[in-house]
Structure formats: C-alpha cells, structure tokens
Image (cartoon, rainbow, N blue to C red):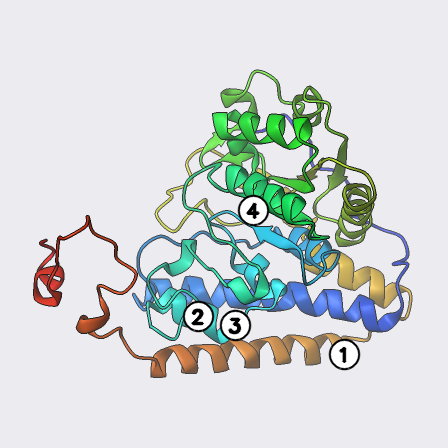
C-alpha cells in the first residue's frame, strides 16, 4: 500500500465551453482506446518488446498537452503513447511504430518506448528512467541561447527523482534560468516500488523547491485541475525567467509493463483508485451540468474506436524496413566499412 489515501472523486462544474470540454473528453477516450488495443495486440504478439500502458493516467496528458503551443518542446518517458498522440502525431504512425513497421514515426526502429517526431517537436520516448531530464534542459538552453520563445515540457515519473539526472537538470535549469516545465507524473510506484520504500523524502515539491524552483501540486485524476494548474505553471515559465515544477498525483490501473506480475500492490487499492477514473468522473460532471448527453458520449467513443481500427489497418498494411537500409543513420569509425550482409548477421 502507498502512504497516499484515495481521495473523493472530482466533482463540481466544468468551467469550459462545451466545445473545449468535449474535445478534452475526446482526448482521454482516444488515449484509452489506443492503449486497450495495444494491450490486446501485445497478447497476439503483433506488438513485441516492452509495452507500458497509460490507462488511468489520461487526465495528465489531456489536461497538460492542451496548454502547450506548437513551438514548445515535449520530452516524455517510455509511457508516452498518450503524450505523442495529443501532441499531434497521427495514431496510425504510433501504431505502425509499435508494430515495428517503417511507416512508424521512428521508422519502426524505436518501438513503443521511442516515439519521436521532430516536426511536432516531440523528442521521445526515453527508455532510461530520468533520461529525458538532461535532454529537456539542453533543449531549453538551446532555445534560450537562440532567442526562441518556447518552453520545454518534460514529463517523468516520481522514480526519476531518485536519479542523479533529476538533480543535475533541476540545478542547471534554475541556475541558468532555463524555460523548462518539469511535470512529475507521480503514480506512486516507481516500476514496482512504493515511493516511501525508495525515497526518504516523499514530499516531491519540497525536493524540487530545494533548488529554488517554484512548485505546484495537483490532483492528476482531475483533468480540469490539471489543465488549470499546468496553465498557471506554463504562464510563469513564459513570463518569468526560470523553470517551474508540477507534481501530478495520478495512478495507473494496469501493471507497470506487460511483463510485470504486479505483486507489490493490493487489488483492493487498485479498485479504490478506479472509482476516481478520469474518464467516467469527468464525463459524469459534464452530463450533470447538461454539457454532454449519453448519445454524445457514445459517439465520441465510437469515433475513438474507429480511429484505432484505422490505425491498426495502417500498421498491418505497413512494410518492414529493407535489409539494404539497415545501415541508415549508423555511424562507424573513420575508414571502417560495414556491409549490409554483415549488418544483417549482426557483425561488423
């Protein structure tokens, strides 16, 4: 069990016009249906390697990504399908990447954990815990030095805050006044270890504040609260020099990865958190205030399902990278040559 109690489900009116409110609900449904299909395809061995699902955490990506502007940079973790999707990557290119097809956003070379799209300024997909933090600081430094008016939003889990990379990135971002929006997706279990078992200081905002960084904490299961808090933090980064840190307390309903036997948390705890599921609590609020009907909800869900099916068809029709292209983007020491045949055999 964690030392964070399950709070009551978010309630109250949604302070947005209907078009925006429904669009945010659509965002969460698109993520959920994509993730569910990915889990199904993994069981069918259509998707191989590692697969980390975002089911239960949709309010974080849906609330935060709509705050960002096209010129901003986004750096995410290996649980990044939702971030990539809402950043504008076509679902078809995400699915093809998970299939390993060359029509994928990383030409099939990255897979689930390494989604990338420079045109959308989406810089991963980082398989290493904490690996995106120094990259985010570097992107922000480049923007500052070149005079670009942009911020870098860096998403990472609470487990990354025990890594040296977190402290190095926080220190330099504050010291050099870099425009980084640090977004900690605290789902309470770093892989399979409860926060209190791995970190002596469990107040994550206090940790970040030790570097002189402004901090905020928000209920990551409430998409309205997420959007408003991240909007406030982003405004601070844009208007004042230096970074900001937001802790988003959320919860994943599925195991850490498809290989995880999930022996570290009680099933009753998972069920209790599911009562706070971001999709059904948010849609209930919209219905209660007359901003959504059941028919409209079902239509949004059907559209998300249709998009998923089209993405699967695209991935199924995709092609594998030709052997002669395997050396593309591979660098070797000067004067050394690698033949395509040798590369195919794994030799040099």
Q: For residue 95, which numbered disc appears in the image?
A: 2
Q: Are marks 3 and 2 in contact (CB under 8 Å)?
A: yes
Label 1 belongs to which residue? 296
Q: Secondary structure at mark 2?
A: helix
Q: Are marks 4 and 1 in contact (CB under 8 Å)?
A: no
Observer-nearest residue: 81 or 59? 81
Find the distance from the CA under tag 3 to the CA under tag 2.
6 Å
Find the distance from the CA under tag 4 to the CA under tag 1.
27 Å
- Residue 165 at what x, y percent from top left? 50, 30
- Residue 142 at what x, y percent from top left? 59, 46
Label 3 belongs to which residue? 91
Q: Secondary structure at mark 1?
A: helix
Q: Is residue 88 above or below residue 171?
A: below
Earlier along the polypeptide chain: callout 3 or callout 1? 3
Residue mark closest to the camera, 4 vs 3: 3
Please say whether residue 206 is visible from this viewpoint. Answer: yes
Find the distance from the CA under tag 2 to the CA under tag 1.
26 Å
> On the picture, is 144 further left or further right than 331?
right
Q: Residue furthest top?
A: 200
Disc 2 crowd rating (10 Å Cα; few below 14, some 14-19, many 20+) is many
Q: Quadrant of residue 203?
A: top right
Find the distance from the CA under tag 4 to the CA under tag 2.
21 Å
Please say whether residue 163 is visible from this viewpoint. Answer: no
Earlier along the polypeptide chain: callout 2 or callout 1? 2
Earlier along the polypeptide chain: callout 4 or callout 1? 4
Label 4 belongs to which residue? 252
Residue at 69%, 19% (x, y): give it.
210
């Amino acid at each position: 069990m964690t030392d964070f109690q399950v709070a009551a489900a978010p309630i109250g009116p949604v302070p947005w016009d209907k078009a925006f409110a429904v669009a945010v609900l659509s965002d969460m449904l698109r993520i959920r249906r994509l993730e569910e299909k990915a889990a199904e395809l993994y069981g069918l061995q259509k998707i191989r390697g590692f697969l980390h699902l975002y089911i239960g955490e949709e309010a974080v990506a849906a609330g935060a990504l709509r705050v960002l502007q096209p010129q901003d940079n986004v750096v995410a973790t290996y649980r990044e399908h939702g971030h990539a999707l809402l950043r504008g990557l076509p679902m078809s290119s995400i699915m093809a990447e998970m299939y390993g097809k060359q029509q994928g956003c990383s030409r099939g070379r990255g897979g689930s954990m390494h989604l990338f799209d420079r045109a959308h300024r989406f810089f991963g997909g980082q398989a290493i815990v904490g690996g995106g933090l120094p990259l985010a600081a570097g992107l922000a430094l480049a923007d500052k030095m070149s005079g670009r008016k942009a911020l870098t939003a860096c998403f990472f889990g609470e487990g990354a805050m025990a890594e040296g990379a977190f402290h190095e990135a926080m220190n330099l971002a504050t010291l050099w006044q870099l425009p980084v929006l640090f977004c900690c997706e605290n789902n309470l279990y770093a892989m399979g270890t409860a926060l209190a078992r791995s970190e002596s200081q469990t107040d994550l905002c206090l940790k970040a504040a030790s570097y002189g960084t402004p901090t905020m904490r928000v209920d990551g299961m409430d998409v309205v609260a997420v959007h408003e808090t991240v909007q406030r933090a982003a405004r601070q980064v844009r208007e004042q020099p230096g970074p900001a840190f937001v802790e988003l307390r959320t919860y994943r309903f599925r195991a850490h990865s498809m290989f995880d036997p999930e022996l570290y948390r009680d099933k009753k705890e998972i069920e209790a958190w599911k009562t706070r599921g971001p999709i059904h609590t948010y849609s209930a609020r919209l219905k209660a205030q007359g901003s959504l009907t059941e028919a409209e909800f079902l239509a949004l869900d059907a559209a998300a399902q249709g998009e998923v099916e089209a993405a699967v068809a695209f991935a199924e029709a995709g092609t594998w990278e030709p052997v002669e292209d395997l050396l593309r983007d591979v660098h070797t020491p000067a004067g050394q040559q690698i033949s395509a045949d040798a590369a195919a055999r794994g030799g040099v």
